[in-house]
Amino acid sequence: MTEPLLSVNNLSVTFRQGGQETQAVKSISFSLQRGETLALVGESGSGKSVTALSLLRLLDPVSAQVSGDVLFAGENLTKADEETLRALRGNAATMIFQEPMTSLNPLHTIEKQIGEILFLHKAIRGEEARARIIALLQEVGIQEAERRLQAYPHQLSGGQRQRVMIAMALANEPDLLIADEPTTALDVTVQAQILALLQSIQKRRGMAMLFITHDLGIVRKLADHVAVMQKGHIVETGLVADVFHQPQHPYTQSLLAAEPGGVPLIPSPDAPIVVEAKDIRVWFPIRQGFLRRVTGHVKAVNGVSLSVRAGETVGLVGESGSGKSTLGLALLRLTEAQGQVVYLGQRIDDLPAKDMRAFRQHMQIVFQDPFGALSPRMSVADIITEGLDVMPDPPPLLKRREMAAQAMIDVGLDPLTMDRYPHEFSGGQRQRIAIARAIALDPTFIVLDEPTSALDMSVQAQIVTLLRDIQRRRQMAFLFISHDLKVVRALAHQLIVLRQGEVVEAGLTEDMLKNPQSAYTKALFAAAFEHHSLG
């Protein structure tokens, strides 16, 4: 057996804060050969991301104490100096992070951010760098790559931002790629492209991959070996086929069995229409030249109509960049749009901003990227009750804390943690905080923008059940944006398929899943169910 590229021995990570110590990773060991993929799986908060960050010494040395050995190509990284680590990171070993909006610099163009990596490690600049950047963007499936060079992160969709992150990580063709949930924000067709891309680069370069995910369908497709983490321990390891077919540990068995279940609520025939939209258009101008004249438009949403009844969930699916999130924002008057939006019989599309405030309590949103949506300077209690300030008569502090506690219980969080800050929670826990904030105001209509994409399978199932229970109790209307058709099937009564801003197909979810009409819908569904199949 050849010497492993990466060998981790008795790695432990302890966080110290306010005199308290929390051990997030507990004496774990594993190794990774060149050209091999090891998947690290487990629930949100199990220690997967902390493990990944500790390998390249990316944790804050003041608050995190790391012990054990991390040997990379014979070098012990736990004892390496800062200069050695700087030369290594982004070159021989790179990392793709879970939340692209917090990893990309909002002030720099895409060209500048990828170009910086090429210059620092390979001294490539000018036309050579530009050509390499365009090739990388094309490789990760970004359309019209040359036009995207001058774009800033906020001008890209969630999926496009994640692809830019992958392009940055692959820029210098590393020996080791640590990928922390790199396909979370991507729809299934692009997930399949990205996974195929990573596999082809891996084959060509003999690159090793440590792939952190909660999606067991990806593990089955991509990894050679799997390590299952629970509460900081690795509880089971082995070949993927062996672990999937004969899981030994009860926790692994429960993970494999977890899947969103149940059926969507069917609204009463006489249920009122909560939100109705007619011919919604969101066109972004393309400006060129010295005078920045408008030379065309990006038609993000182009003539979409829909209605959502009380107690009903309408699912919205389509590829990354198809206009799903933009449509959700347009319905809530959070982006400029043309067309009619009617809330409980009243038109709100032409209301002045000050008059819209009265509706904000009743119309809420849960964003795709919880870390970007939660203020790092506010405690969880303040985040959840922040919206109460728009009420005509905001409740007193004690009542607010009671409401925050109830909302946290509703989404499966410990109310004793309400005075902590977002960075002290895992990605999945942050998403539950975002859902708690939305339901705390007892709204009538919620836009759920990929609310389960950051969650592991067992928590996804819990959140789906939770959303359905809240909907049943309070007769809320949901617009559910997702690329995960198993979650959509469990929640959405009606389904709309979007492509390039236009409706391709719409109807009852179960009818469409059984008998899709358009070629695009058939391809989308086939990719989803083939990708997620564990059978």
Image (spheres, rainbow, N blue to C red):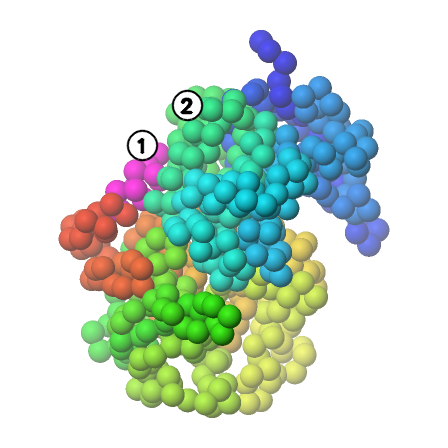
- Report the side of 270 relative to 443 (left or right): left
Position of 320 with respect to 380 (left or right) is left
Who's the residue at 72% across and 34% down the image? Answer: 87
Magenta highlight: main SS: helix
x, y (%) of residue 107? 62, 61
Q: Residue at x 47, y 45 (%)?
A: 134
The picture places residue 417, in percent across and down from the top left corner, at 67, 59
Residue picked out by circle 1 = 535
Drawn side of residue 464 relative to residue 525, left or right: right
Could you say whether the residue bearing mark 2 is in a helix, strand or loop? helix
Q: Where in the figure is residue 175, as x and y percent of width and height?
A: 59, 27
Q: Residue at x 43, y 29 (%)?
A: 200
- Visible in this render: residue 264? no
* Lower sequence index among marks 2 and 1: 2
Please say if 23 is above or below 421.
above
Q: Residue furthest top?
A: 1
- Kind of residue sitting beneath label 2: Ala
Q: Which residue is mark 2?
A: 241
Q: Residues within 10 Å of mark 1 (few under 14, many from 20)?
A: few
Q: Is residue 527 magenta?
A: yes
Say which of 132 and 157 sits in front: 132
**Residue reaching furthest to the right:** 19
Range drawn in magenta: 525-535
Residue 43 left/right relative to 140: right
Q: Residue at x 79, y 51 (%)?
A: 17
Badge 2: how crowded within 10 Å, few (<14), some, or many (20+)? some
Q: Nearer the viewer, residue 150 or 236?
A: 150
In three-dimensional space, the C-alpha distance between marks 2 and 1, rounded to whole angstroms, equals 12 Å
